[in-house]
């Protein structure tokens, strides 16, 4: 068992306090992940900046959810899958998409399925995707920009998934109702 402190604004290192205040202001709470990341102000800042960049990417809410949850599910992140389920619901993503991602069943559109397939290819091949992988992604309507943005989202999710695995971050109360475990 690991021993990572969940910081609040009072206990956090000085450099993390403004980022935790930002979390509290924007989310009405300090998510457990942010509380753990606060041990390193640079990690918390990097994560929050990456998150904002993902929100500002060319992906719509369905597509962001597909990339986020594809990575979360593949990495079997006990914390991020329930959290992003709740986030997806707040973003008005359909239950058909949410359930297909959580259950690893076909998505309701070929374009979203192509996005999931490409995200898995980038992830599992560690960026060494084939020309066929790229062509299938482009055929679905995506461009070079989205190739790069998949990598950006993957960078964000590596931070959160790996930290949650190591720190064994407990799922936040609002997201416990979306508890999840990977199909075997």
Image (cartoon, rainbow, N blue to C red):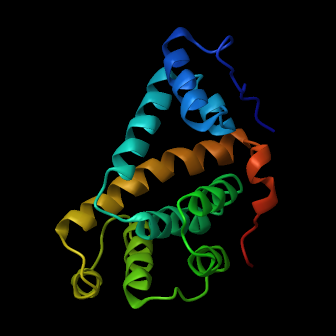
Count of marks, rendered view: 0
On-image quarter of the N terminus: top right
Residue at image position (51%, 88%) is: 108
Is 98 on the left-hand or right-hand side of 149?
A: right
Is 181 on the left-hand or right-hand side of 111?
A: right
As displayed, is residue 109 above or below residue 159? below
As displayed, is residue 42 above or below residue 57? above
Q: Residue 25 sits in which quadrant?
A: top right
Is 104 on the left-hand or right-hand side of 52?
A: right
Question: Would residue 52 be seen by someone viewing this image from the given angle?
Answer: yes
Is 17 on the left-hand or right-hand side of 178?
A: left
- Residue 160 lies, in percent from the top left, at 55, 46
As displayed, is residue 17 above or below residue 4? above
- Residue 11 lies, in percent from the top left, at 68, 12
- Residue 157 lies, in percent from the top left, at 49, 52
Q: Residue furthest left?
A: 144
82 or 71: nearer the viewer:
82
As displayed, is residue 27 above or below residue 14? below
177 or 120: nearer the viewer:
177
On-image quarter of the C terminus: bottom right
Question: Would residue 179 be seen by someone viewing this image from the given angle?
Answer: no
Residue at image position (57%, 75%) is: 94
Q: Residue 124 sits in which quadrant?
A: bottom left
């Amino acid at each position: 068992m690991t021993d990572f402190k969940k910081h609040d604004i009072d206990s956090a290192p000085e450099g993390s306090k403004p980022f935790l205040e930002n979390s509290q202001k924007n989310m009405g709470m300090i998510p457990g992940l942010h509380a753990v990341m606060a041990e390193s102000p640079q990690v918390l800042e990097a994560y929050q900046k990456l998150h904002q960049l993902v929100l500002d990417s060319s992906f719509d809410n369905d597509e962001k959810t597909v990339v986020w949850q594809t990575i979360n599910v593949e990495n079997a992140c006990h914390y991020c899958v329930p959290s992003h389920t709740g986030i997806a619901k707040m973003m008005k993503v359909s239950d058909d998409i949410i359930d297909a991602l959580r259950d690893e069943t076909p998505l309701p559109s070929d374009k979203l399925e192509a996005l999931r397939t490409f995200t898995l290819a980038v992830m599992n091949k560690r960026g060494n995707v084939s020309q066929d992988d790229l062509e299938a992604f482009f055929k679905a309507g995506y461009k070079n920009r989205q190739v790069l943005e998949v990598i950006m989202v993957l960078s964000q999710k590596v931070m959160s998934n790996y930290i949650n695995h190591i720190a064994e971050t407990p799922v936040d109360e609002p997201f416990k109702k979306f508890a999840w475990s990977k199909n075997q």
